[in-house]
């Protein structure tokens, strides 16, 4: 497993964020209240924001230098593409394909089969979040870094249980197959304790 070596500082307005970590954990959780900088921390990790000082390394190289599957809260789907096209692009970007059985479980847990022919711009907010989650998982298959910002938000109770079950299976597969690490942000401490090897508050 690649090692996280994070030492980042960032201050804007009322936010004064310092993030330090040295860990070999496979699944890292970030927990905290709204407005405490969790999403900002992810954007610093990925190089989307420039820190005031410091660096984010994974296996000794900058995090953004390797393949990443990211499911942000604002989705970032290509709106003029269909759901199938968005997912195909993620598959093409992946270091290796997700095993067929695991991909079938992903599509089933997120109930994406009925959505594949729809344009991303025609999706509801909840549907879009499910597609963004699937896209991230497919893009990070194998050794890619998987980054999930509130992956279970806006899901109804039944679907939430299905998706959490899938993420547990995915975590087990990535750990046992030598797959890449994951960083998960959530307001739910219970979800993070179930999914992750280490949780930072």
Image: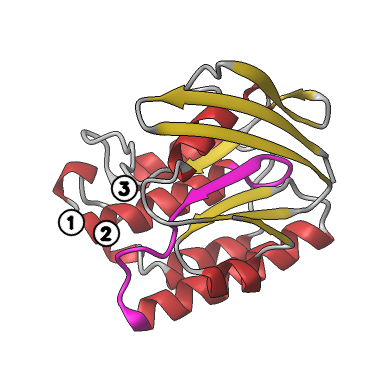
Would residue 51 appear left or right of 25 to someone viewing this image?
left
Report which quarter residue 167 is drawn in. Answer: bottom right
Name the residue: 45% across, 41% down: 37
Q: Residue furthest left?
A: 122
Decide which of 26, 121 is in the foreground and name it. Answer: 26
Q: Which residue is mark 2?
A: 127
Name the residue carrying label 3.
83
Judged by depth in the image, the label closer to the viewer, 1 or 3, is 1
> Mark 2 and mark 1 in contact (Cβ < 8 Å)?
yes
Q: Residue furthest bottom?
A: 158
Q: Is residue 194 magenta?
A: no
Location of residue 19 in the rendering, given as x and y in whole percent from the top left corner: 63, 36
Q: Give the Cα separation between the discs numbered 1 and 2.
A: 5 Å
Residue 186: give x, y in percent of width and height: 48, 59
Instruction: Give the mark count.
Output: 3
**Which residue shows up at 39% across the image and 48% down it?**
132
Measured along the vertical axis of the image, is residue 43 above or below residue 161? above
Provide the residue designation for mark 1.
Answer: 124
Mark 2 is surrounded, within 10 Å at the Cα level, by few (under 14), some (14 to 19) or many (20 or more) other residues, namely: some
Residue drawn 17% across the image and 42% down it = 121
Position of residue 114 in the picture relative to residue 143 (left or right): left
Looking at the image, which is closer to me, 72 or 174? 72
């Amino acid at each position: 497993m690649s090692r996280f070596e994070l030492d980042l500082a960032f201050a804007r307005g009322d936010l004064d964020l310092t993030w330090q970590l040295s860990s070999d954990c496979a699944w890292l959780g970030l927990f905290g209240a709204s407005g405490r900088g969790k999403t900002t921390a992810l954007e610093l990790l990925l190089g989307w924001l420039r820190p005031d000082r410091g660096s984010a390394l994974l296996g000794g190289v900058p995090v953004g230098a390797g393949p990443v599957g990211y499911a942000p809260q604002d989705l970032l789907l290509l709106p003029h593409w269909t759901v199938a096209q968005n997912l195909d692009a993620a598959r093409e970007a992946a270091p290796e394909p997700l095993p067929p059985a695991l991909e079938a479980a992903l599509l089933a847990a997120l109930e994406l089969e009925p959505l594949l022919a729809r344009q991303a711009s025609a999706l509801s907010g909840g549907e879009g979040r499910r597609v963004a989650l699937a896209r991230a998982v497919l893009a990070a298959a194998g050794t890619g870094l998987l980054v999930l910002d509130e992956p279970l938000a806006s899901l109804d109770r039944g679907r939430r249980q299905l998706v959490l079950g899938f993420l547990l299976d995915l975590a087990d597969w990535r750990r046992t197959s030598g797959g890449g690490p994951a960083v998960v942000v959530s307001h739910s401490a219970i979800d993070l304790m179930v999914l992750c090897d280490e949780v930072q508050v």
